[in-house]
Amino acid sequence: MQDYANNYADNAICIIHSQDQTHKKICKLDEMDQHERLIAARKAAGFATASEAARALDVREPTYLSHENGTRGYGRQADRYARRFGVNVEWLLYGRGKGPDGTLHAAHAMEPQPLPQPAMQPSERPPYDGAFSRDVPVIGTAAGSIIRKDFEGMLIEEPIEYVRRPPALTSARDLYAVYVTGESMEPEHGPGVLRFVHPHRQPLIGDTVIAVTRAHDDDPGQAYIKRLKKRTAEHLVLEQHTPHAFIEIPLKYVISLHKVLTTNELFGV
């Protein structure tokens, strides 16, 4: 009987110890800063080093390292990181929701508070949410070739999801969206940012465009999200920000040239 009691007590102590260790692990995850949660998510996803993760994410290593060491925020890339590391984006940003340990966590990080909104008159109330159909395809993109040493392209793939139409484009035909790949258009269009594209709106000089080319010279035939710098009867001149560079493409090799919409155009401002 005494042996049974001792064994029971030992087992109880082991259970309590195990529960205590689990509690400490959960508390540790709850107390992490944003950049520490990124490190935890990366390790849980099986990436031993930040460099390895940066390559898998197609993010420049210095940029990703600055996100992990906390010198730069990663709000714009949070959704991309969360999807790649298999965690809840709410947890990654605010410590709320399901973390890499599969446990639901309360929010301990300071969340941005919404600004107080003035009371709306009935005539000012927003339209019914169902009016904005979730029928805009998001075309998948992947890192393309870098031509002429520094001019970065991307590959266009099949639709990966559908998103709601912006308010000013409820009747626009053939509208589509893309997630920006690479950092060549930072800070205007950072990696992972969603951009809407209107194939039937004429782009003007200075507009951001998506140009799709067929193979020629050193161009393998791919897409470019760049600024339209110049257009002649025979050539397009495109500009990128990082590194700053220009490229001239003969029009005979341009399959399509579509306008990337501004925020004002999305909301009819």
Image (tube, rainbow, N blue to C red):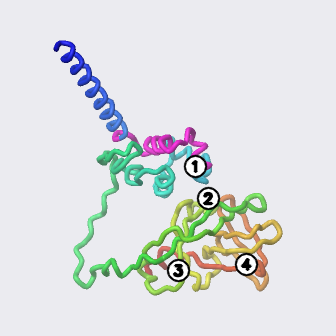
Q: Which residue is mark 2?
A: 183
Real-space CA distance between mark 4 and mark 2, rounded to the nearest whole angstrom: 23 Å
What residue is at 57 percent from the left and 46 percent from the top?
53
**Residue projecting furthest to the right:** 217
Real-space CA distance between mark 1 and mark 2, rounded to the nearest whole angstrom: 10 Å
Q: Earlier in the sequence, mark 3 or mark 1?
A: 1
Camera-nearest label, 2 or 3: 3
Specify the segment rendered in magenta.
Answer: 30-56
Q: Amino acid at mark 2?
A: Glu
Q: Earlier in the sequence, mark 4 or mark 3?
A: 3
Task: Determine the secondary structure under disc 4.
Answer: strand
Q: Earlier in the sequence, mark 4 or mark 1?
A: 1
Q: Are marks 1 and 2 in contact (CB under 8 Å)?
A: yes
Locate residue 196, reporting x and y percent.
52, 74
Real-space CA distance between mark 4 and mark 3, rounded to the nearest whole angstrom: 20 Å
Q: Are marks 4 and 3 in contact (CB under 8 Å)?
A: no
Q: Which residue is mark 4?
A: 254
Q: Are marks 2 and 3 in contact (CB under 8 Å)?
A: no
Res. 63 mark: 1
Q: Are marks 4 and 2 in contact (CB under 8 Å)?
A: no
Q: Earlier in the sequence, mark 1 or mark 2?
A: 1
Residue 176 shown left or right of residue 29 in the figure: right
Residue 110 versus residue 168 in the image, above or below: above
Q: Is residue 130 magenta?
A: no
Q: Amino acid at mark 3?
A: Leu
Residue 23 versus residue 64 in the image, above or below: above
Res. 175 mark: 3
Task: Determine the secondary structure under disc 1.
Answer: helix
Task: Determine the secondary structure under disc 2.
Answer: loop
Real-space CA distance between mark 4 and mark 1, rounded to the nearest whole angstrom: 32 Å
